């Protein structure tokens, strides 16, 4: 297998908007960018930025954002902000099943009203319950309920009808009610 990751030189590339996608111009080539990912999101958030296509294949690796032209840097930072800033769900307004077998969620967050779609357990993380993290099946944006037990009763009732929670999730941990 011949795997070659291209390290991009920030001063020599351009990233511009092309409809609803980004377009990378480097070495005379134009490539569509569908995902921008931090390789080390906590330790070095502005270094080692991976630019990827629709399939997740890496198009190039930026060692730093320093040196990018102003417009390119603004676009990269906006995409990183959208990917890594996780809105916190405060209220669940409505959940409806969709014809693809998933559910559409209408929520109110600390960033205002939003909606997202989940399709099965792969878009849902209950591992740190009572914290719940959702990943939108369409945009891959994440949303978080910091503590399910602190949601209002109406939101908890709506969520219970659609979340695959076992009895351990109702065990009374951290303020939850026991169902015994």
Image (cartoon, helix red, strand yellow):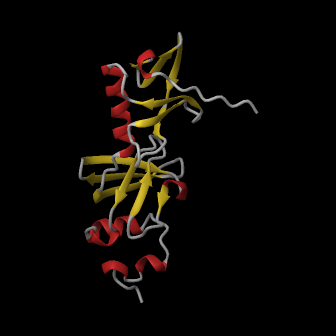
Q: Using residue 180 as the reference point, say whether residue 26 is left or right of it.
A: right
Give the residue drawn at x 30%, y 57%.
89
Q: Looking at the picture, tell me which residue is in the foreground, 29 or 66.
A: 66
Q: Position of residue 6 (x, y in %)?
A: 58, 26
Q: Is residue 47 above or below residue 6?
A: below
Give the residue drawn at x 33%, y 33%.
78
Q: Position of residue 155 (x, y in %)?
A: 30, 65
Residue that protrudes farthest toward the right in the picture: 1
Quadrant position of residue 71: top left
Give the residue drawn at x 26%, y 53%.
108
Q: Looking at the picture, tell me which residue is in the foreground, 140 or 161.
A: 140
Q: Position of residue 126 (x, y in %)?
A: 46, 65
Quadrant position of residue 148: bottom left
The quadrant of the picture occupied by the N terminus is top right
Give the residue drawn at x 35%, y 40%.
82
Q: Position of residue 102 (x, y in %)?
A: 50, 52
The quadrant of the picture occupied by the C terminus is bottom left
């Amino acid at each position: 297998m011949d795997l070659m990751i291209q390290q991009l030189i920030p001063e020599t590339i351009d990233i511009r908007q092309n409809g609803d996608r980004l377009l990378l111009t480097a070495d005379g080539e134009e490539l569509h960018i569908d995902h921008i990912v931090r390789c080390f999101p906590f330790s070095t958030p502005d270094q080692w930025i991976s630019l990827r296509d629709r399939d997740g294949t890496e198009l190039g690796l930026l060692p730093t954002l320093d040196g990018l032209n102003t417009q390119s840097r603004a676009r990269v930072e906006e995409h990183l902000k959208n990917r890594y800033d996780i809105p916190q769900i405060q209220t669940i307004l409505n959940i409806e099943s969709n014809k693809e077998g998933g559910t559409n969620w209408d929520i109110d967050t600390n960033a205002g009203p939003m909606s997202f779609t989940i399709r099965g357990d792969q878009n849902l993380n209950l591992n740190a319950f009572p914290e719940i993290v959702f990943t939108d099946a369409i945009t891959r944006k994440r949303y978080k309920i910091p503590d399910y037990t602190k949601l209002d009763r109406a939101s908890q009732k709506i969520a219970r009808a659609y979340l695959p929670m076992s009895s351990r999730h109702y065990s009374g941990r951290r303020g939850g009610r026991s169902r015994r």
